[in-house]
Image (cartoon, rainbow, N blue to C red):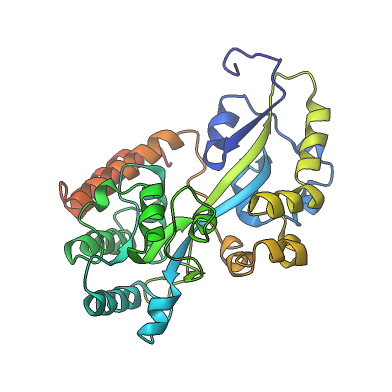
Amino acid sequence: MLAAKDNTLDLFLIDVVRTATFAAAGWAEPLDAYLPSKDTYLKAFLPGPVAAATVGGKLYAMPAFTDAQFLYYRKDLLEKYKAKVPKTWDELATTAARIQKAEGGTLQGFNFQGAPIEGTVCNFLEMTWTGGGSVGDVTSPAARQGLNFLVNAVKTKLAPAASAEMKTDDSRQQFQAGNVLFGLNWSYAWAHFQGNSPQPTRVKGDVGVAALPAFGKNASATCTGGWEWGVNAFGKNKAASVKLLQFMASSDVQKEMAIKGAYLPVRKSLYNDRSVLAANPHFKALYPIVTKARPRPVTPSYPRVSEIIRNNVSAAVAGSKTVDAALSDMKRDLTPLLK
């Protein structure tokens, strides 16, 4: 519809990674002219969703709700073995190996996404960022260290042998079944773990959530997720559409979405709201994590960027490519896209 310049559509809801593609195609209306006090208005929002909605200094979308990847862990097992929530990836590996050995059976020490999917892109970026690196140099020591960690997790049986086929909801279901000590996943998983799920849960009340570990003394980092509202550049009701988006991004609507749907708000103040926290106590622990969430590369070529990263990471995790070959191929193909 947008490619045909159809004007019957006023608004659309898109994933945060699509902004630059829609902007470059001329499909999304820049919102700056409709928000005369844009900078002041956006100060109330989390920086990650705003960054993901911005291209070339212009705001092309209104954040609808946010998300990020978190470290979920079994509180009961850490307590049983007097272990702390890991602050570094090395601590995670050591703790997981110790508890796996003591528990025996089929307990996974660490579960991540390694299939050629978007979650795998985020896992790789998070590993790179928490090593002090960036997607601009995927052959850096930080990127190599991060991908090596994922590959070695499989080799040492910290992570399952089938990690190269692991998708996001596979990770969620396996953690929910009580088979995982530490797992990477998005905020939606929390409600499932607490029993609001089609599948039974064996971990209700035993799940903790924390920021992702880092390598050495580097800072934790996570990927910004979530969705945002765009205005059709060819639409007939642009000013009215922006007013509706401001209403959707208002404190009242964001609060209702958080309470009734457990959506992570894009407004900072709601993470201290009593009624929001009464419905979602875990939001308090998530707030310092989502405030530091980083967007994936903001580029019109993102679909191709994602494909290059996820395919190479999955191949390395599967053992069909060496870490160096995967990173070298990644750099070769990403370089012309990320200039």
Does residue 204 appear in this view? Answer: yes
Residue 23 percent location from the top left of the image: 60, 31
The number of numbered badges drawn on the structure is: 0
Q: Is residue 8 left or right of 84 when viewed as pictured?
A: right
Image quadrant occupied by the N terminus: top right
| Residue occupying the far front of the picture | 200
**Viewer-side residue, 188 vs 155:** 188
Q: Is residue 276 above or below residue 36?
A: below
Residue 278 percent location from the top left of the image: 71, 66
The part of the image, by quadrant, that contains residue 148 is bottom left
**Viewer-side residue, 144 vs 213:** 213
Residue 213 percent location from the top left of the image: 42, 70
The part of the image, by quadrant, that contains residue 48 is bottom right
* Rendered residue at 23%/59% (across/down): 151
Q: Is residue 23 left or right of 120 when viewed as pictured?
A: right
* Rendered residue at 42%/83% (across/down): 79
* Rendered residue at 27%/46% (across/down): 165
Q: Is residue 31 left or right of 327 when viewed as pictured?
A: right
Q: Is residue 128 above or below residue 17?
A: below
| Residue occupying the far bottom of the picture | 82
**Viewer-side residue, 124 vs 131:** 124
**Viewer-side residue, 255 vs 334:** 255
Image quadrant occupied by the C terminus: top left
Residue 12 percent location from the top left of the image: 65, 29
Q: Is residue 226 above or below residue 79?
A: above
Does residue 87 appear in this view? Answer: no
